[in-house]
Amino acid sequence: NAGVTQTPKFQVLKTGQSMTLQCAQDMNHNSMYWYRQDPGMGLRLIYYSASEGTTDKGEVPNGYNVSRLNKREFSLRLESAAPSQTSVYFCASSASGGAHEQFFGPGTRLTVL
Amino acid sequence: QKEVEQDPGPLSVPEGAIVSLNCTYSNSAFQYFMWYRQYSRKGPELLMYTYSSGNKEDGRFTAQVDKSSKYISLFIRDSQPSDSATYLCAMTGNYGQNFVFGPGTRLSVLP
C-alpha cells in the first residue's frame, strides 16, 4: 500500500517549456487535489477532483490544467512554464465527504528558470 | 486580512516543554479544523481533526477549537526532538468547500 505517489520528485524547466506532474493513489479515494506550497504562503489549492470525471478550480488555477485520468490518477500540466510557477507541488486524496482527512504525496520540487 | 493566520515562528523549545500552536480565522462557515505536521522535504500528514467547537486529545496532542473567538490551538505535551517540524492548521466547511491552510509554524524541540 503505497498511499499517494508523485512523479517526478524534482524537475528543472526553462521558461516556456511544458510538463506534466503525475499523481496516483491506491486507497480507492474518490477525491484528489493539487496544491502548491511557497515559503510563507502555506498550501494553496490549484485544482481538485471530487470524483472521477469531474474537476474544479481552486484558489490559484491560472497557468495549470488537470486531467482525472481514472479513479487512481490525477495529473497536473503546465503548458508554458513561468518562473512564478517555481514551487513545491503536492498531490493529495481523500474519501468522499472526507476533505478534512487528506493524505498527501511526497511532493515534486519544480524550478523554472 | 488573510482567511487563516498563523504565527510563522520559528519556535524553539527545550525537550519536555509544553508547546502551544495557534491559528485564527475569519470565515464563520468553517466547521472542520485540522492540524497537519510536515517534516522537512516531506508531504504534510494529518495529526488530528476536530468538528465544530471543543477539545480532542490523542496521546501527547490536544486540539482545541473556540468558534466564538475563531481561534484554534494545538498543544503538545512532553515535547520531543522528533516533534521538530512545521505544523499547519487547516479548515473547511461541512461539505469540504473552501478548504484553507494556514502558512505553518516551524517548531524546533532542542534535546
Image (tube, rainbow, N blue to C red):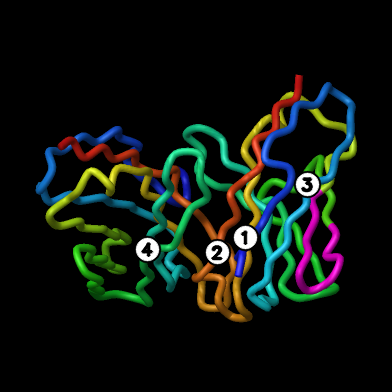
Disc 4 marks which amino acid?
Leu
Residue depicted at 10% across the width and 47% down the height? B17
CB of mark 1 within 8 Å of CB of mark 2?
yes
Q: Is residue A59 left or right of residue A79?
A: left
Q: CA distance from mark 1 to mark 2?
A: 5 Å
Q: CA distance from mark 3 to mark 2?
A: 17 Å
Instruction: Give neighbour class at mark 1: few <14, some 14-19, many 20+ (Cα, 10 Å).
Output: many
Whether callout 4 and callout 1 share a subunit is answered: no
Q: Which residue is mark 2?
A: A103
Residue depicted at 47% across the width and 34% down the height? A40
Residue depicted at 55% across the width and 47% down the height? A43
Residue B47, which numbered label? Answer: 4
Subunit bearing disc 2 = A
Measured as percent of width and height from the top left, residue A20 is found at 84, 45
Instruction: Give neighbour class at mark 3: few <14, some 14-19, many 20+ (Cα, 10 Å).
Output: many
Instruction: Specify the quadrant that holds the N terminus of chain A.
Output: bottom right
